Image: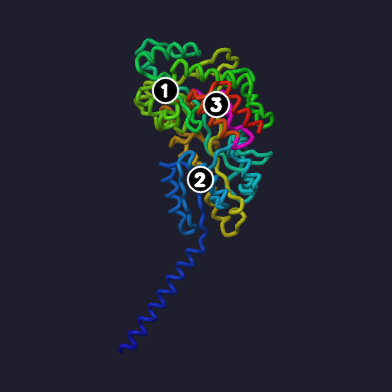
């Protein structure tokens, strides 16, 4: 009897072992796809729900790293030969060229040939320039952005001030606000943000400022009349104490917005990815106005704002060419390019959709204000898009930090950026 019982137990054990190993083998046969992105919050929750929905087909590993930390993560993993299968990345040749030249990311025509769901006409024509390198596209544009200059109208009314139209108006209001303990303009530069974008909005007010920037990757000339004027305008703001005393600590998107929300600052230059962070009661007190016109401006800021495509989804070329992964990558990417995802991305404050879709109105007051105000403005791409290399762009950002912090003069700022291009 004992021998029979032992035999039964042994057979059961073997059966369970075979079953478990079979289950493990089935799991191991599923392709594992890594998707890396920099959006937390609602987008992260949405991706987790999608990963759960496809778990019977493939294993989707999600890697979320906020903001510029995501960029550093991708760069490190590329250097180690471990790039994710699909990942968000910053747009334009400045950011994409090195990955293209090293054969890391996929020409999207190869994806479109097999997708079955996505075509080029689904996206606005201008959006494709964001992922163009030597006439081919190496990513799918996700979200576009437009700068907007927000002023707390209630603070201007409280101190009997008119909203500024010119640089002189800004100087006059700065004096009054400073006398009353209010920072006139919430602006700084920490790793270039948001200062480098504001710099573009100032430089493009000069005749030829935008065309000079567009030629930058070929001309390698940063020392232009427009850029010198913009640097001098930043120097004016420092002299007038129009910005926070510590522009490094108060640089970056979070501190900048916090000052405005607390009404410690009267004005702010911001972008769509921060829209949801503005408090509704502060939005109710605010209006959008053009960036004040700097002295000698030939190109009125009423007619333009700066912007472009901020983030694109790119595909690891080696992963796409792996037969075990291709079908899963196609399914994931088709989902990422769906109307639902683009609508949710826009309504959750990640920017305006690069895809041609109709968004519902009334979801967020500031979102609608920005859409309405910028609808008649031309969109000029920021300097970032036109640097010939990531290294040169990084030097520009660090020089912005020094300029805003009054650590270098306007002349030294322009010379520092020019030197990096000369190298």
Q: SS class of the residue under badge 3?
A: strand
Q: Earlier in the sequence, mark 2 or mark 1?
A: 2
Label 2, label 1: how many angstroms apart (C-alpha)? 32 Å
The image's mark for residue 179 is none
Range drawn in magenta: 373-391
Q: Position of residue 281 (x, y in %)?
A: 34, 25
The quadrant of the picture occupied by the C terminus is top right
**214 vs 111: above or below:** above
Q: Quadrant of the N terminus?
A: bottom left
Mark seen at residue 306: 3
Q: Residue at x 53, y 45 (%)?
A: 74
Query: Which is more toward the observer, 90 or 132?
Result: 90
Viewer-nearest of discs 2 and 1: 1
Image x and y of residue 232, in percent: 55, 18
Q: State the SS at label 1.
A: loop
Q: Would residue 245 be seen by someone viewing this image from the given angle?
A: yes
Give the residue pinned by disc 1: 245
SS state under label 2: helix
* Number of the front mark, 1 or 3: 1
Image quadrant where residue 275 sits: top left
Q: Residue at x 39, y 22 (%)?
A: 265
Residue 73 badge: 2
Is-magenta flag for residue 155? Answer: no
Of 325 and 383, which appears nearest the observer? 383
């Amino acid at each position: 009897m004992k021998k029979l019982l032992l035999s039964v137990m042994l057979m059961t054990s073997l059966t369970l072992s075979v079953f478990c190993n079979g289950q493990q083998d089935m799991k191991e046969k599923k392709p594992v796809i890594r998707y890396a992105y920099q959006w937390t919050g609602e987008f992260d929750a949405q991706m987790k729900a999608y990963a759960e929905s496809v778990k019977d087909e493939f294993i989707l590993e999600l890697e979320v790293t906020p903001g510029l930390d995501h960029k550093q993560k991708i760069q490190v993993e590329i250097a180690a030969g471990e790039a994710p299968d699909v990942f968000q990345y910053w747009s334009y040749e400045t950011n994409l060229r090195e990955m293209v030249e090293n054969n890391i990311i996929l020409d999207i025509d190869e994806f479109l040939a097999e997708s079955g769901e996505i075509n080029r006409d689904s996206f606005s024509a201008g959006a494709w320039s964001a992922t163009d390198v030597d006439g081919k596209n190496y990513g799918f544009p996700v979200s576009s952005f437009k700068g907007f200059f927000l002023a707390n109208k209630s603070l201007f009314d409280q101190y009997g001030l008119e909203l500024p139209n010119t640089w002189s108006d800004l100087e006059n209001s700065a004096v009054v606000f400073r006398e009353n303990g209010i920072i006139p303009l919430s602006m700084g530069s920490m790793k270039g943000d948001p200062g480098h974008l504001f710099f573009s909005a100032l430089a493009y007010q000069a005749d030829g400022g935008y065309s000079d920037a567009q030629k930058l990757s070929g001309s390698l000339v940063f020392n232009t009349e427009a850029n010198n004027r913009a640097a001098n305008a930043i120097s004016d703001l420092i002299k007038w104490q129009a910005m926070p005393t510590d522009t490094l600590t108060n640089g970056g998107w979070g501190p900048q917005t916090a000052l405005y929300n607390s009404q410690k600052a009267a004005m702010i230059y911001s972008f769509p990815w921060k829209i949801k962070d503005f408090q509704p009661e502060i939005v109710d007190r605010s209006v959008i106005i053009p960036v004040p016109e700097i002295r000698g401006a030939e190109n009125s800021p009423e007619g333009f704002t700066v912007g472009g495509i901020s983030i694109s989804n790119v595909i690891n070329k080696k992963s796409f060419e792996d037969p075990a992964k291709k079908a899963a990558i196609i399914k994931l990417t088709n989902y990422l390019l769906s109307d639902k995802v683009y609508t949710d991305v826009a309504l959750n404050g990640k920017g305006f959709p690069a895809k041609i879709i109709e968004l519902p109105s009334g979801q967020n007051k500031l979102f609608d204000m920005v859409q309405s105000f910028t609808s008649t403005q031309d969109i000029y791409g920021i300097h970032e898009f036109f640097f010939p290399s990531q290294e040169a762009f990084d030097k520009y950002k660090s020089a912005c930090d020094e300029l805003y912090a009054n650590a270098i003069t306007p002349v030294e700022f322009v010379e520092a950026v020019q030197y990096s291009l000369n190298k």
